[in-house]
Amino acid sequence: MQIGIIGDIHGAWDEIDTAFFNASGYDALLFVGDFARVVNSRGVARRLAQLTVPAWAIPGNHDATTLAQLLAEIRGRRWATHWTALGMRRRVARLARELGPVTLGGFSLHSLGPDLGVVIARPHAMGGNRLYFRPYLKRAFGVSSFADSRDRLCSLIDAAPRDLIVLAHNGPAGLGADPSDPFGCDFHPALGDFGDPDLRDALAYARTTGHRVHAVLAGHMHHRSKHTGAWRRTWARTDETLYINTARVPRIEQGGERRHHVCLSIEARAAQAETVWVDRAGRIAERTLLAPSDPSAPQA
Ligand SMILES: [Fe+2]
Ligand SMILES: [Fe+2]
């Protein structure tokens, strides 16, 4: 099974992308969220609605949120986070409608085939130092703490088939605290590991229940630091799970000549992934093996 994984779009999607993926032959597409350039996802959502390949998405912190809400959340202004969350359920529902055939998930379980499940993790994740968008998560899902979120994810894993992949906006904690690590904090290095602790704990739980999590796909922590210009390590493999940060931003480079995504292959043994660049003519210009199955091999 081959799955196209698309990282943070942030406005960078056009009809060339839609035509490429519709003709790609992928069995499915997964979107890690952050469709909006800043806060308005509607234009990208309407373009994604033209996709004919089965597709699932998780909303990022820039989707169905407002600028005032993002500022309130970043600054940790308790009352402002409450009043700016009013209307978020309506905004999420509108985004789901605008995405058309692309299924918008969040705390949800889906099937990619008879034997492969997809758990879509906590929506709108924005970093592991605190639970962002709590007023919305509480109203929509009854989740008001990392422990609530972990429990909700564990119950999805209980209901899932043995073979699984996980789609998240931000990655799990536990993959390193350095800005160069897949989900290390680059904009405030003192915050260290910016992965989600609820997702880390749910993945640990999945190992105890005999599930096989082939891959965890996320974004949010952009590959290149806006502050230092440094590039981060974009993947890791532990045990039998491949973790990929797909947030190449901007995903379209060189005036439209290079368009990024990741091709994930789920085979019987181990998940494999390649970075794929598509050109303006919709042809694959470059494929680079991202994750050799040998865990001792050096990382790219
Ligand atoms: Fe992003
Ligand atoms: Fe994000």
Image (cartoon, helix red, strand yellow):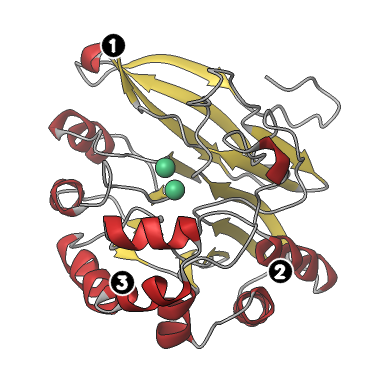
Residue at 75% across, 43% down: 175
Say if disc 2 is inside 8 Å of ligand 2: no
Which residue lies under the disc numbered 1? 254
Query: Where is residue 46 drawn, in percent x and y?
Result: 13, 52
**Mark 2 neighbour class, 10 Å CA radius: few under 14, some 14 to 19, many 20 or more:** many
Tag 3's secondary structure? Answer: helix
Earlier residue among tags 3 and 2? 3
> Dot 1: what SS?
helix
Residue 81 versus residue 165 in the image, above or below: below
Disc 3 crowd rating (10 Å Cα; few below 14, some 14-19, many 20+) is many
Residue 59 seen in the figure: no
Residue flagged by tag 2: what amino acid is it? Ala
Name the residue: 24% across, 31% down: 20
Please give the label number shown on residue 245: none
Q: Which residue is mark 2?
A: 202
| Residue 61 in picture, x, y percent from top left | 40, 56
Instruction: Tell whether 277 sits left or right of 134.
Output: left
Question: What x and y, as percent, mark residue 110?
Answer: 46, 70
Q: In x, y percent, where is residue 123?
A: 45, 65
**Residue 227 visible in the current orientation:** yes
Q: In the drawing, does residue 17 fall left or right of residue 173?
A: left
Q: Which residue is at a point 54% across and 82% down the rendered structure image?
A: 143
Up-down relation of residue 186 to residue 94 (above or below): above
Disc 1: CA contacts within 10 A as few (<14), some (14-19) or many (>=20) = few
Q: Ligand 1 shows up in which quadrant of the image? A: top left
Inspect the image, locate mark 1, and give the three-letter code of the amino acid beneath it.
Answer: Gln
The alpha-carbon separation of the residues under discs 3 and 1 comes to 37 Å
**Which residue is disc 3 drawn over?**
84
Identify the mark nearer the N-term, 3 or 1. Answer: 3
